[in-house]
Amino acid sequence: MSAAPETTTIAVGDDYDVVIGSGVLGRVADLLGADVERVLVVHPPTLPALSGAVSDALRERGYAVHLAEVPDAEAAKTTSVAAGLWAQLGQAGFTRTDAVVGVGGGTVTDLAGFVAASWLRGVRVVQVPTTLLGMVDAAVGGKTGINTAEGKNLVGAFHPPAGVLCDVDVLATLPQADLVAGLAEVVKCGFIADPVILDLVESAVADDPDRARSAANPHLRELIERAVRVKADVVAADLRESSLREILNYGHTFGHAIEQVEHYSWRHGEAVGVGMVYVAELARLAGHLSGPEGDALVDRHRSVLESLGLPTTYAAGRWDELLTTMRRDKKSRGSTLRFVVLDGLARPTRLVGPSDEMLHAAYRLVAGPASAAAH
Ligand SMILES: NC(=O)c1ccc[n+]([C@@H]2O[C@H](COP(=O)([O-])OP(=O)(O)OC[C@H]3O[C@@H](n4cnc5c(N)ncnc54)[C@H](O)[C@@H]3O)[C@@H](O)[C@H]2O)c1
């Protein structure tokens, strides 16, 4: 019996491919394109084996490989780390046809993408995401950026990668909390576009709840492929954040507010989980979801997220802070709040300018105990 094909390739419009498979790190060179001589491999200190495997594969194919270890997590997304990488590129003589490879979570792919976008006004970047969030969200879509003292992701560029390589095997070492937080974005894709995702999550949980929350989830690869397809289809149709792309922000307005109020001590996916329950309740209050079907869909938000161990409530008594923060969100236009809500399963629409009373009522429906956030 011959081995099954090991990769799935998902095209993001005509721009680039996302290649997903098992044990595929060695294929990184295939995504670089022609004429590249030098490659800067950007990686965090936590992944020496993975960055080593990627570098070896590139050296074997004859590339001059330069390694750039950057600080872990958000500490990588600073102007001083970016400046260090620009210096390294300059000293190594990187030209317009050379390339950057980001090996790491969303923080590394954001940084590597931004440095590639800005070096000589744009060189190629291949992303090798190593977290679930990186695979299904950060590395796909071309948004890159770093933080400043004033806030997260305030400096950045749209710079689509030359390719994205997702090796699902690397998720085996990812801490469970990071894996579960990534699953929140996968579940989001289920609600806005691909309900099979929800069926797969529910069946994995029914079979073995602990396994469902780990890299041993039997449907993990299919979940990644489906979530990437949802994101790829949306961004191919709409590179710059305008109308369609907005649906990817399902649950994010309220989620971002939680992240800020909590000074980023919550993982993004955890905050988005509560945010999705919030907009589900908001949709019901606004009449977008009604009757037994609407009620069942709202309940399904809670049940799927809770079954994965994600929070679905937020501390009571913090409404004023959350509302102020949501009004400042860079995705709202003027002072009018806009939310992506559902008219039904996989039927996203916009809710523009709901009343303060309605916003507050939805908050009361997700509010847990006042003392501490349920997480
Ligand atoms: N550009 C976009 O469209 C986009 C979308 C979503 C999120 N983001 C950004 O992504 C970032 C968050 O990404 P993240 O959640 O991947 O965080 P992260 O990059 O900080 O990674 C989380 C942790 O996991 C470790 N890690 C990574 N891969 C591992 C592996 N295979 N095994 C063991 N440990 C591993 C990292 O060292 C880190 O400590 C945020 O900065 C956010 O702004 C960007």
Image (cartoon, rainbow, N blue to C red):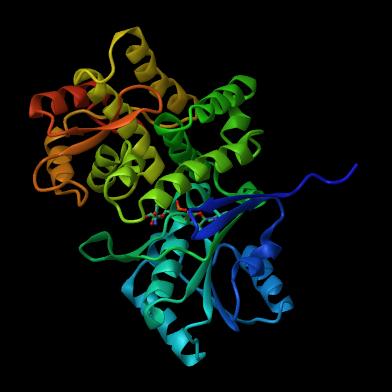
The residue at the point 33 percent across, 15 percent down is 294
Q: Position of residue 246 (x, y in %)?
A: 30, 44
Which of 352 and 259 lies nearest the eye of the viewer? 352
Residue at screen point 36% across, 76% down: 118
- Residue 368 seen in render: no
Residue ID at (38%, 75%): 82
In this image, 329 relative to 93: left or right?
left
The residue furthest front is 14
Residue 119 appears at what percent x and percent y? 40, 80
Nearest to the observer: residue 209 or residue 153: 153
Count of marks overlaid on the render: 0
**Residue 338 location, x and y as percent?**
19, 38
Q: Within the image, what quadrant is residue 284 found in?
A: top left
Q: Position of residue 253 (x, y in %)?
A: 25, 41
Image vertical order of residue 225 relative to residue 343, above or below: below
Q: Is residue 182 above or below residue 18?
A: above
Q: Is residue 35 visible?
A: yes
Quarter of the picture containing the C terminus is top left
**The N terminus - image quarter:** top right
The answer to whether residue 359 is left or right of residue 108 is: left
Looking at this rendering, what residue extends furthest in the right direction? 1
